[in-house]
Amino acid sequence: MFTFLSLEVDIAIRCVFVLKRFSAVSFQMLKPDWECHSLAETSRKTLKSKNHHGSPIRLQSKILAIISHPADLGAVYVAESAGTARRVVLETAESSHIYRGPTTPLTSLALSTTFSSDSVFAGSWDKSIWSWNRTTQALKRRYLGHSDFVKALLCIRVNGADVLISGSADGSIILWDIETGEKLHILKGGHTRGILDLAVDPTTYPSSPLADHDGISIVIFSAGSDREIRRWRISDDLSTARETETDKPIIQHETSVYRLHFDADDDLWTASADGNVKCLNRERGWQADSTLVHGDYVRAVAVDERGGWVVTAGRDEDVKIWDRASGKLHHTFSGHFEEITGMVLTGQTVVTVSIDATIRRWSLKAEDLRKVVREAEEAKKGVEKEEEVVQKKGVITHDEERELAELMGSDSE
């Protein structure tokens, strides 16, 4: 009796194993590819959303932009798809200030560079720029002039005047007098598609964003969906603003350039939808000195001067840490479960935001990095061992297949 039951159980187990494999394959063959992918992707995101990597601060809507203020340490400002901007204290996860008014997604942020104009600015899908008093949260002026989404913002101070610079999906750049709301200049004709980012050339502007500029002129770099990077010169008295080297845009990427970042050497780092991050050397006429292949759309890049790291992030949800000297990937932080939309570096802490509505922090301190790298290596070894065990247990040998066929054949007789 024991032998007969054991044989029955053995046959049942083997048959179930085969049927499960057959059913899984048949099910996938019957379902459309897009539906199978959608179900798998939803399941993956649901599972990944439960992780606590990066000490997530969870908000209620997608986060589309992040910025920090040099005089407001320990906090970041974020823009949400729900139309709100907020100041978030990283240590406590408290939303200490919430800036309301818009009813469409906010895609970009800027902060005034002096306390005399203590304001938060947000570019919106409604084609306008909203502003609030940073401390009281009171709604201030609204700037109207673009004909499409406002994608990039900058604040500069020129000879005592606070100036707001905006770049839009309409391909134009507008310089605004912050106090009066007057359009000082409208710059067009350079980019053939939307503008995605703006950056100030540090060689033409004070190293401290809280200082006044009193030089001859300021140069602004703009990046667009047309893969071009263009330069614009603004006179110190704000009387003129024009593109420089109109026939020589910087072209180093295959498609959209999402982010511009100047490092301490005044070289320019760029992040692109072509999956690459590049360091463009000033002395070599903005030719690429190095290329980091992140993969997928790269939305953000930052340089940790103290540790010698370059940080990249984007649509693949990963935060990648690169050795700046060698160009080699050192570590990958994983935690976000949707596209990363922005990143700032505060000290040696990387702060990232995502469509998954979370703010996450990643330490670049030497001891912290050593720890996470060691843990990642140990986890990888553990997974490899588990896979070996599963493979040994789950694979039917030729002898087992022949035995099962004989058993099933005898049963049918």
Image (cartoon, rainbow, N blue to C red):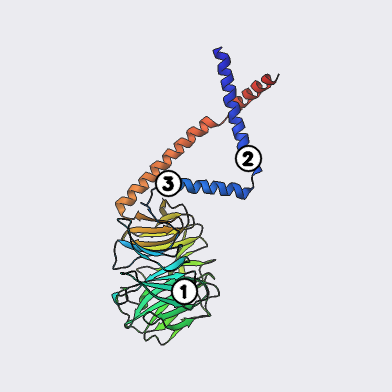
The answer to which image quadrant residue 308 occupies is bottom left
Label 1 packing within 10 angstroms: few (<14), some (14-19), many (20+): many
Residue 351 shows in the view = yes
Compared across the picture, whether 47 is left or right of 375 comes to right
Mark in the foreground, 1 or 3: 1
Q: Residue at x 63, y 35 (%)?
A: 22
Q: Residue at x 61, y 27 (%)?
A: 15
**Three-letter residue code for mark 1:** Ser
**Three-letter residue code for mark 3:** Lys
> Is residue 154 depicted above or below 92 in this figure?
below
Q: Considering the numbered disc 2 on the image, is that residue within a helix, a strand or a loop?
A: helix
Q: Which residue is mark 2?
A: 27
Q: Which residue is mark 1?
A: 128
Name the image quarter holding the N terminus: top right
Image position, residue 321 (x, y; %): 40, 56
The answer to which image quadrant residue 108 occupies is bottom left
Q: Considering the numbered disc 1 on the image, is that residue within a helix, a strand or a loop?
A: strand
Q: What's the CA distance linking mark 2 and mark 3?
A: 28 Å
Q: Which residue is mark 3?
A: 50
Label 2 packing within 10 angstroms: few (<14), some (14-19), many (20+): few
Q: Considering the numbered disc 3 on the image, is that residue within a helix, a strand or a loop?
A: loop
**Is the C-beta separation of discs 1 and 3 under 8 Å?**
no
The answer to which image quadrant residue 363 occupies is bottom left
Compared across the picture, whether 275 is left or right of 283 comes to right
Q: Give the mark nearest the N terminus, 1 or 3.
A: 3
Q: What's the CA distance linking mark 1 and mark 3?
A: 36 Å
> Is residue 373 depicted above or below 68 in this figure?
above
| Res. 395 mark | none
Figure label count: 3
> Is residue 218 depicted above or below 356 in this figure?
below
**Is the C-beta separation of discs 2 and 3 under 8 Å?**
no
Residue 260 versus residue 309: which sits nearer the camera? 260
